[in-house]
Image: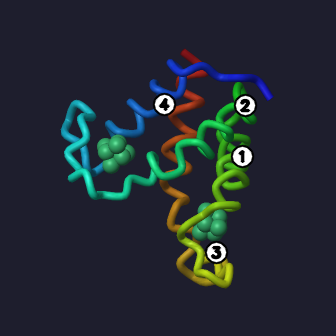
Amino acid sequence: MSKVDFQYIDDVKTIVCKQCSKSDKYGKCLAPPETKCVLETYLPQVTRALETAHGGKVDDYLLSLRTEVCSVCKEKTENGYCYTSDSYGCPLESFFRTVADAAVSLDAA
Ligand code: SF4
Ligand code: SF4
C-alpha cells in the first residue's frame, strides 16, 4: 500500500464533484446539507481504496473500491442482501467508476 496525500484525495473529490448531478458547472456542490452524499459517506473507505490501488489501472481501483466499501455498504439490507445478486446490479458501480477514472487520470498527469 502506498500512502496518498490529502491533496490527492482532494483532487479526486474535485473531479468527482464536477461530474456529480448535484453540482454546478464548476463542481460546486449545490446539494442541501441534509443530503447524503455517497462520496462523503464512504470517504474513509474511498481513501483506503485509493491508497491500496495507488498507481494501478482502472480495474485495480474498481476492485479496491468495491472491497473497501462492500464491508460497510449501506445499500445492503440488514440481513446482508446485496443488489449484485439480482438484475439491478450494484447501485454504487457508476460512483466507483467515476472515482477510479479520476484516480487514473491524476496518476497519468
Ligand atoms: S453531492 Fe457529494 S459528490 Fe456531489 S457535488 Fe456534492 S459533495 Fe460532490
Ligand atoms: S451494493 Fe455494491 S457496494 Fe454494496 S455490498 Fe453490494 S456490491 Fe458492495
Q: Which residue position is annotated with label 2?
A: 56
Distance from label 3 to label 1 (Cα)? 17 Å
Q: Which mark is residue 75?
A: none
Q: Secondary structure at mark 1?
A: helix
Q: Which residue position is annotated with label 4?
A: 12
Q: Which residue position is annotated with label 1?
A: 64
Q: Mark 3–mark 2 contact, CB under 8 Å?
A: no
Query: Looking at the image, is 54 positioned above or below residue 46?
Result: above
The mark nearer the N terminus, 3 or 2, is: 2
Instruction: Give the left or right position of residue 99, taking residue 54 as reference.
Output: left
Q: Mark 2–mark 1 contact, CB under 8 Å?
A: yes
Residue drawn at x 73%, y 41% is: 60
Residue drawn at x 71%, y 23% is: 3
Q: Which mark is residue 84?
A: 3
Q: Secondary structure at mark 2?
A: loop
Q: Mark 4–mark 1 contact, CB under 8 Å?
A: no
Say which quadrant the N terminus sits in: top right
Residue toward you, 57 or 47:
47
Mark 4, ligand 1, within 8 Å: the answer is no
